[in-house]
Image: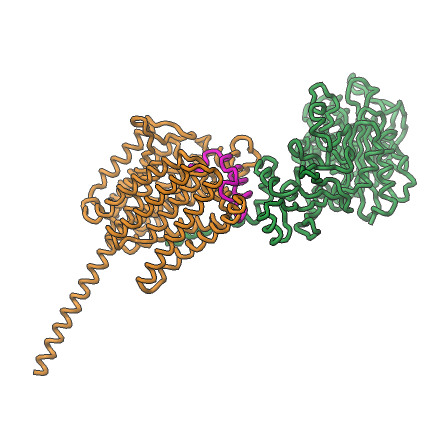
Chain colours: A orange, B green
Amino acid sequence: MTNLIVELSKFAFIILIALYTLLSFTILKKKSQGEMNYGWKLQNLLMFFFHLLAYVVLYLQTEEIKILIFYLFQLFLLQAVIVLTGVIYPKINRLVLNNMCMLLVIGFIMLTRLSYDRAVRQFQMAAVSLVLAMVIPLLIRKCSFLQSLPWIYGGAGLLLLTVVAVFGDTSNGAKLFLKIGGFAFQPSEFVKLSFVFFVAARLSKSTAFKDVALTTVMAAFHVIVLVLSKDLGGALLFFIAYLVMLYVAAKNPLYFLSGLGAGSAAAWAGYHLFSHVRVRVMAWSDPFQYIDKEGYQITQSLFAIGTGGWFGMGLGQGTPNKIPVVVEDFMFSAIAEEFGGIFSVCLILICLSCFMMFVNIAMQIKNNFYKYAALGLGTLYGFQVFLTIGGAIKFIPSTGVTLPLVSSGGSSMVATIAMFAVIQGMYLLKEDEDLRIEKERKQRAKARAKKTGAGKKEKIR
Amino acid sequence: MITYLFTGLFVLLIGYFVYFDAVLSPEVINNPYNSRQDAFANRVVRGKLLASDGTVLAETVIDGDGTEVRSYPYGNAFAHVIGYSTRGRTGVESLANFHLLTSNAFFGERIAKEIREEKNIGDNVITTLEPRLQQAAYDALGSHRGAVVVLEAKTGKILTMVSKPDFDPNRVNEDWDALNKEDNSESALYNRALQGLYPPGSTFKIVTLLNYMRENPSYEDFHFNCRGSLTEGNYTISCYGKNVHGDEDLRKAFAKSCNTAFSSIGLSLEEGIFKSNCESLLFNAELPLELPYSKSAFTLKAGSTPAERMMTAIGQGETLTSPMHMAMIVSSIANEGILMEPYLLERVETYEGDVVKNYYPSVYGSLMSREEAEALTEYMKAVVTEGTGSKLGNLGFPVAGKTGTAEYSSNKDESHAWFVGFSDTGEDDIVVCVLVEKAGAGSEYAVPVARKVFEVWGDGNIRK
């Protein structure tokens, strides 16, 4: 019986996520607010049904009651987030909110299946972050001084990164973690935010050559320190985010091109200078030749994805734990193995939908600081998704970055939820802007109507 | 613009993912390192392995109590090439593992069985193997150790692959410890056709001859007076069996396998060119083979002593090769210089006989020009008509080949017998390579084995 449920649940998961994904791309085209609200509710319903079914399957296979209790905790948290956000911020961007919850759910399910303890820790971090994140949109809305502190962002970020580079703990070859009181955290995740704020604050003030040069030097320091800590994925993310922000702010393709040139030169130099870069590239170009060592991880990932096929092995039916560091760098492969290829494509599309929404919000904001910041955060998010999934499927060399909200990792969880909340704050700002403009327009119209109305009366008289 | 750029990246990502799942993944997950394949065995009954004529070479029999037993009806005769799947996987059992454990039966039937928690029936894999040739080669080798490879020159199909000593694939589990004993000199699990490395002996004169032709466009003017031995410095090479061949041209020297003439050729050759010519014939190189094999070695380099050059030219010295590699070189001679990649899998079918996948011949590349191949063919025919391969006469069709007697130790009386050659009818010709360990002269021990294979092939039933 369990076998049958597992077997059928495979197809149910695919149908649920496919419908969810379809809605992500179609709801915004709906005309009326009512239809849209109905769509958002439907998305939540699909998600909760998916969540429930997955935990039923996990429970049937393990027959551990703690799985069900854990499920109830998650259910409560997600419901609270959706309801409370709706009450406190009625105008919030529902797509971003729903997608965030959906990605969290996928992450919780897969982590529970891979390692219950990690899943519990993940849940705790998510709960704390979600509560804290409730105030972020308010802060963004009320604190306009945020945009005038560039050197605080830049200085603090660079300092943190330097401290990690010097005192940090090594994990998988890169210095990423800082241990404080038995609690390990990964500062580069938070520096992502401060870095984007720094660049946005600087570029929104001036794009004169001298200022751009100074900003670039500071940004380059960030990247160099990351390279020295051997966090190449992080360095690449910061670099691309800076390039995109600079291009949009300065509107000068020359910056973009010379940036790309410098980046390529740096990549070339990195390849020749660092053996771990060569190892990654080697493992990527022909993993099967080095299957015992350098290529082991990527070939295990490919075996997982390939064996899963289009429909997956079924939740709990694969062996994703064979992939080294699966819970961090190779979550996508684990998902592809058990949920299958169709599900995985939907997952990529949900991430894409998040990214497009971020950029969309950025483009509509009038205030340059917020515009650039939203764009920078969106780029960081989008490019990170690209790097981690591309690495898992051997499209590009593996860079050791995680899938935001899905992969295990407390710092990443806090920083990503904060990032989503910041974007929500900017969205609300944009709504305020729209409202103000709308109001002004109406007032002007009213005033005009009064004038002409008065004129008419006089004529009649 | 940024949106488009990133959306484009995502589209590429999804595109590659779909491409991977649809096109690349079957090959990837068939890798023997993929332990996930074992998971399939819980849901699918392993399919059958069949010969090209439909003969069952391996099948899974289910006992009354539901136990699955892998059965190999031909036992030892196909042991190495078909392999086993009980203790790890080897041979075709390893190559075709993914297909054997995948069911492409009717969709509804599969779903119904999954719901009833019954196993589905895996696909059958049809090999290129030709059972009558395999059996003939297996029998002809008798109690000797050695290997026989038969290829179809035009396609690269592997028709036969025999290795002795052998083992019973039905009893791999029971015999495992005995087969793997450290003091077991037999190495019965070892596939000598692919993994055995031997000095090629006089079969290497084919290579030396090709090299000589390339270095000397007027090679037909070659003349040599064989007095039975040649001494250079303090090293002497003699002809086999103390023969004295007298005045000879290149054709006769090759047909009679004159060591003296060929070592004098060896002295005249440019080592660098010799080496690069050998490497173009895939010495010191990867071979296009799917099963584990050993790389051939050719080590002669500039500054080597006259003795080394003389020995290398007649296939002694440091040169080592496998029966499969020699068969591949000769298959390119039989196929106008073009080497076809040897292959073992012909077709995948559902258990009901619907075709799932066909395999097609694939060209590896040109090892030599058509003219060179034709010239070598003429010389190799002379071996049969007037030289050491005369026991292959009167088959009813022409055969071209070369014998070899490879000394492998300082004891000159012990040697491996070689023969490599092909039928030259112009239609679906086969290449036969025979190696008999520690037997003696190639003309006496290897040629008769090849003759048995050619006879069975020539009886008309196998030749299309």
The structure residue drawn at horizontal position 55% and vertical position 31%, both measured from the top left corner, is A292
Q: Between B86 and B445, which is closer to the camera in this rendering? A: B86
Quadrant including the C terminus of chain A = bottom left
Percent across and percent down for residue A363 are 30, 54
Q: Is residue A157 magenta?
A: no
User: Closest to the observer: A323 or A269?
Assistant: A323
Residue B6 showing in the rendered view: no
Q: Quadrant of residue A65?
A: top left
Predominant SS along the magenta part: loop
Residue B59 falls in which quadrant of the image? top right
Q: Nearer the viewer, residue A380 or A106?
A: A106
Q: Residue furthest bottom?
A: A460
Q: Is residue B47 above or below residue A443?
A: above
* Residue B363 shown left or right of residue A119 in the figure: right
Based on the picture, tell me whether residue A320 belongs to the magenta stretch.
yes
- Name the side, left or right, on which A55 lies relative to B448: left
Q: Position of residue B154 (x, y in %)?
A: 76, 46
Q: In the figure, B306 relative to A4: above or below?
A: above
- The number of callouts visible is 0
Quadrant in which residue A277 is drawn: top left
Residue at x 25%, y 52% (from the top left corner)? A87
Q: Position of residue B152 (x, y in %)?
A: 77, 43
Residue B453 seen by the camera: yes
> Residue furthest toward the right?
B394
Task: Give the magenta range.
Answer: A300-329
Vertically, is B290 above or below B427? above
Q: Which residue of the protein is positioned furthest toward the top in this rendering?
A: B234
Percent position of residue A234, x then y: 37, 38
